[in-house]
Image (tube, rainbow, N blue to C red):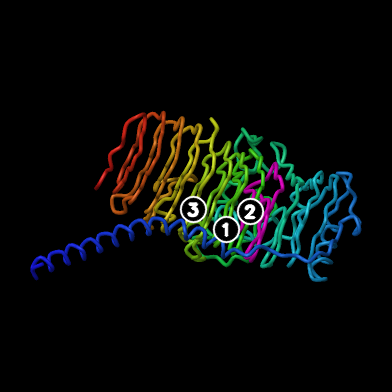
Amino acid sequence: MSVLKHKILLLILILGILFSCNSKKDKVGEVNQWDKMQQIIDSISVPVFSDKVFSVLDYGSIADGVFDNTKSFKDAINACSQNGGGKVLVPKGKYFSGPIHLEDNVNLHLEEGAEILFSTNPKDYYPLVHTSYEGTELMNYSPLIYAYKKKNIAITGKGVLNGQASNDNWWPWCGKDVYGWKEGMGNQKDSLNLPVLMEMGENNTPVNERVFGENHFLRPSFIQPFECVDVMIKDVKIINAPFWVMHPIKCTNVIIDGVTVESHGPNNDGCDPEYSKNVWIKNCTFNTGDDCIAIKSGRNGDGRRVAIKSENIVIQNCKMIDGHGGVVIGSEISAGVRNVFAENCTMDSPNLDRAIRIKTNSKRGGVVENIYVRNIEIGQVKECVLKVNMFYGIYGVQSGDFIPVVKNIYLENITVKNGGEYGILAKGYKESPISNINFKNVSIEKVGQPYSLENVENINFENTYINGNLMTSIKN
């Protein structure tokens, strides 16, 4: 073989190796995103508890649905924590109670057949605590179950947590007649209530000076671990919440497993991780009056003050029934959200508006990036499969100087029978287009229009059929 031929063959071999490496790199880069999901799961600590059992009956609880068990629950929880932790057992029966505050190393365990009926008297939720309302921190009514700066805590068991909220209590405070509000009744929209809180958030008023509570009509969350580490909520059923159902805020290592949420009140989001990292939501059923899962990171100025991203959120094997959206990011999102993984879920209801939704605006700002969704079965949604709206707004004008960024959205192996009005409904800013939406192996059998787009760059379709038509990528 001549030297020239040898050099040519060597060059071809080198080019082939380089091409092969680049191809593998592309494939590995794609796979590695899902490898990262497993790394997140592996990094989450599962709470571990002592074998000690502290039955609430031993501390004076009476399971007749009438006796006030607030003190006996508190005594059992304190005794458990002070003696090295363990299980606070709520045996079968109905227990009326005010707010429950968890302590370190406590697993509040509801035996099958146990139901906790929470008070609907706002005065029972004093003293006020450091909490949050729609992305703005304040001093307000205690959540129904609350933990502040605790570690290694859990709520488990096959029992029921019943907030007893209805059109006769809590819900009318939203100010909508469909939820029991009538002219002349106080509500959160009154000028001295939520509008004042929002202004305080914008003005960076110290949180301990944002004192609300009585006559301000801001409803408490149901379950709120606040700045906690190693949290688990497992197997319980939660019904009739005053406001957001599960709200881990500023938490690290959160597991929500096998929980059923049935609550159709106003703002009854099923789960709202906010400013939280390493959150694993799995095997849950959401049947809600608002978003099934909504990932948050603070409203406007208050979100920028806190400046903690919500990141590394994993959602697996969940069922979404009614709700404004299945997996939602926003709208309180000013500190940003990244690395969200959702797989192996089903979404199906004429009362489920969207499957995947991102909502923000130029008052919120923030960056939303790296959203990965795969292996989702969608029966029916009302509006669209994917909605990205950078002009979302309620409570008046929602425009400002903080232009948001939304990029890197991946949907793969998605089957949709009825997608509603649009496959993709996306509206970005001219100066900040939504970028890099990817559909791979997606089939939408029936939908009004494949898409409606405004200021969107690079939509990549691979083996994607909408209304029976093979879709072509859109490069801008």
Q: Quadrant of residue 368?
A: bottom left
Give the residue displayed 43% in from the left and 42% down from the top.
Answer: 413
Amino acid beneath label 3: Phe
Task: Judge the density around disc 1: few (<14), some (14-19), many (≥20) Cα neighbours within 10 Å.
Answer: many
The image shows residue 375 at horizontal and vertical percentages of: 48, 44
Marks 1 and 3 sit apart, C-alpha to C-alpha, by: 10 Å
In this picture, residue 119 sits left or right of residue 426: right
The image shows residue 317 at horizontal and vertical percentages of: 57, 46
Marks 2 and 3 sit apart, C-alpha to C-alpha, by: 15 Å
Mark seen at residue 400: none
Residue at the limit of the structure toward the front, as seen here: 1
Dot 3: what SS?
strand
The image shows residue 13 at horizontal and vertical percentages of: 21, 63
Where 54 falls versus 358 (above or below)?
Answer: below
Give the residue displayed 52% in from the left and 59% down from the top.
Answer: 38
Query: Magenta span covers which residues?
Result: 219-248
In the image, 424 versus 412, the foreground residue is 412
Q: Earlier in the sequence, mark 2 or mark 3?
A: 2
Give the labeled residue for mark 1. 279
Amino acid beneath label 1: Val
Task: Judge the density around disc 2: few (<14), some (14-19), many (≥20) Cα neighbours within 10 Å.
Answer: many
Q: Quadrant of the N terminus?
A: bottom left
In the image, 5 versus 315, the foreground residue is 5
Give the labeled residue for mark 3. 341
Q: Earlier in the sequence, mark 1 or mark 3?
A: 1
The image shows residue 20 at horizontal and vertical percentages of: 28, 59
Dot 2: what SS?
strand
In this picture, residue 166 sits left or right of residue 38: right
The answer to whether one can see residue 366 in this image is: no
Mark seen at residue 256: 2
Amino acid beneath label 2: Ile
In this picture, residue 256 sits left or right of residue 12: right
